[in-house]
Image (cartoon, grey):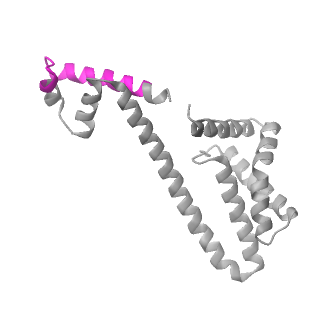
Amino acid sequence: MSRNQTLLQEDQDLIDGITNGSTESLRIVYKEHFPLVAQYIIKNSGSEEDAKDVFQEAIIVLYDKINKGDFILSSRLQTYIYSVSRFIWLKKLNSNNPLTVAMHQELEETLAVEDDLQESNTKEMQFHLMEESLNLLGEPCQTIIKDFYIHDLSMQEICEKFGYTNANNAKTQKYKCLQRLKKLYFSY
């Protein structure tokens, strides 16, 4: 398991713990993620008390999302908590000072870019894992999968290329190859 997968699994374990009412999971989230939020808020005209309030609000947002049952962790938990905390803090600054409207808009744009980058990183990681799995697959499966899905060859063309007796046999072989590919992909 890669380091990134391990970190994502640890984050998911914390989410599962929060879902199940674990105070230990909440303690770990606070210990691991509060310092970064506090550092940001203190650097941006806030105090330690402000940081505690904002962090608590961010945890409430996280908790509410988890309890709704529609929360899917698509980034690191730290990124999520930090982004929510930044948003809350900028909103508080905005309500106290109209000059921060531009800062608030910039944050919304930054969050959108961060979400896009996270989604892109996730897809890139999945693509890389699929590529590695395909490379481990071996022949003739590797070529059959590439011919069908990348080169758009028909089952009849694959049948003729590999000398199968009919297209159904080629289709059966492609299915077996896909099963092996899935097994390799999900073993990472």
Viewer-nearest residue: 167 or 183:
183
Does 84 appear in magenta? no
Q: Name the spot of residue 163 as percent of width and height, x first.
A: 13, 20
- Image: 87 above or below 129: below
- Image: 162 above or below 119: above
Q: Name the spot of residue 148 as percent of width and height, x first.
A: 24, 34
Q: From this viewpoint, which residue is outermost toward the bottom?
A: 99
Image side of residue 41 versus residue 110, left or right = right
Q: Quadrant of the N terminus?
A: top right
Viewer-nearest residue: 54 or 5:
5
Viewer-nearest residue: 135 or 106:
135
Quadrant for residue 134, please give it: top left
Image side of residue 74 versus residue 14, left or right = left
- Image: 72 above or below 89: above
Count of numbered marks: 0
Q: Name the spot of residue 181 as percent of width and height, x first.
A: 38, 27
Image side of residue 166 versus residue 111, left or right = left
Residue in view at x 38 percent, y 36 percent:
131
Q: What stretch is highlighted in magenta?
A: 160-183
Residue in view at x 18 percent, y 29 percent:
155
Does 170 appear in magenta? yes
Image side of residue 56 versus residue 168, left or right = right
Residue in view at x 60 percent, y 45 percent:
73
